[in-house]
Every structure is written in C-alpha cells, then in structure tokens.
C-alpha cells in the first residue's frame, strides 16, 4: 500500500513536472513573440518617423516650385497684357494710315 501511494505521488509529481516544463516552454515562446513584436513595433515607429521627416522635406522643397509657378503665371499675365496693348497700338496705327488725311495735298511743282 505504501508502495502504491509512493508510485501515485511519483506519477503525480512527474505529471506536474511535465506540465511545468510545458508551461515554461509556452512562456518562453510568448516572451520571444512579445519581444519580437516590440522590436518590430519600435522599428516600424522609426520607419514611420523617417517617412514623416521625408514628407516634410518634400513639402518644404515643393514650396519653391509653388512660388515658381506663381511667378510664371504672373509673367504669362504680363505678357498677355503687353500683347493686347501691342495689338491695339498696331490697329490704331493701321486706322491712322488708312483714314483720309484732312490736310490739303502738297502743292504740285511747276
């Protein structure tokens, strides 16, 4: 009877040790997974910050392009105005040359 009790306790102890070993292995796997996720998350955070920094640099470098486009639009507007004024001037000169002269014709020689 004592042997039976000892065998039962030994069997129970072995099962408990096996469960503990399994729990330790599971705990180690979970710890590794958590560490991996943290490291990956930290890496992703670094990459996100780098992407944000690059976006800001692109936006800042795009500003001169916006200024350049505005300047080009201004030049186009001034050019259009000058062309319109030139056309008006040419038309007025053509009208002046076609219109009959109100001055008397020059005297004929001799």
Image: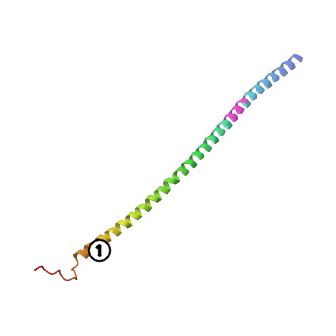
Q: Does 10 sit left or right of 52 as displayed?
A: right
Residue placed at 66% from the left, 37% from the top? 37
Residue 75 visible in this rendered orientation of the protein: yes
Q: Nearer the viewer, residue 84 or 40?
A: 84
Q: Residue 77 at what x, y percent from top left?
A: 41, 64
Residue at image mark 1: 92
Q: Can residue 1 be seen in this view?
A: no
Does residue 8 lie above or below 67 as drawn?
Answer: above
Image position of 107 (left or right of 85): left
Quadrant position of the C terminus in the picture: bottom left
The secondary element bearing badge 1 is classed as: helix
Colour scheme of this structure image? rainbow
Q: Would you say the magenta stretch is mainly helix, strand or loop?
A: helix
Magenta residues span 28-36
- Count of marks placed on residues: 1
Residue 20, located in which quarter of the rendered image?
Answer: top right
Q: Which of 1 and 87 is in front in this view?
A: 87
Residue drawn at x 83%, y 20% is 10
Q: Give percent across and percent down for residue 59.
A: 55, 51
Magenta region includes residue 29: yes
Q: Nearer the viewer, residue 31 or 51?
A: 51
Q: Residue at x 47, y 59 (%)?
A: 70
* Residue 72, position as x, y percentages in the image: 43, 58
Residue in the foreground of this view, choosing between 22 and 8: 22
């Amino acid at each position: 009877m004592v042997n039976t009790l000892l065998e039962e306790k030994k069997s129970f102890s072995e099962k408990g040790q096996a469960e503990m070993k399994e729990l330790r292995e599971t705990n180690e796997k979970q710890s590794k997974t958590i560490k991996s996720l943290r490291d990956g998350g930290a890496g992703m955070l670094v990459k996100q910050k780098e992407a944000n920094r690059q976006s800001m640099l692109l936006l800042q470098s795009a500003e001169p392009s916006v200024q350049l486009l505005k300047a080009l639009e201004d030049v186009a507007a001034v050019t259009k105005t000058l062309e319109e004024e030139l056309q008006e001037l040419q038309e007025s000169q053509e009208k002046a040359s076609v219109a009959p002269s109100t001055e008397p014709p020059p005297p004929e020689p001799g």
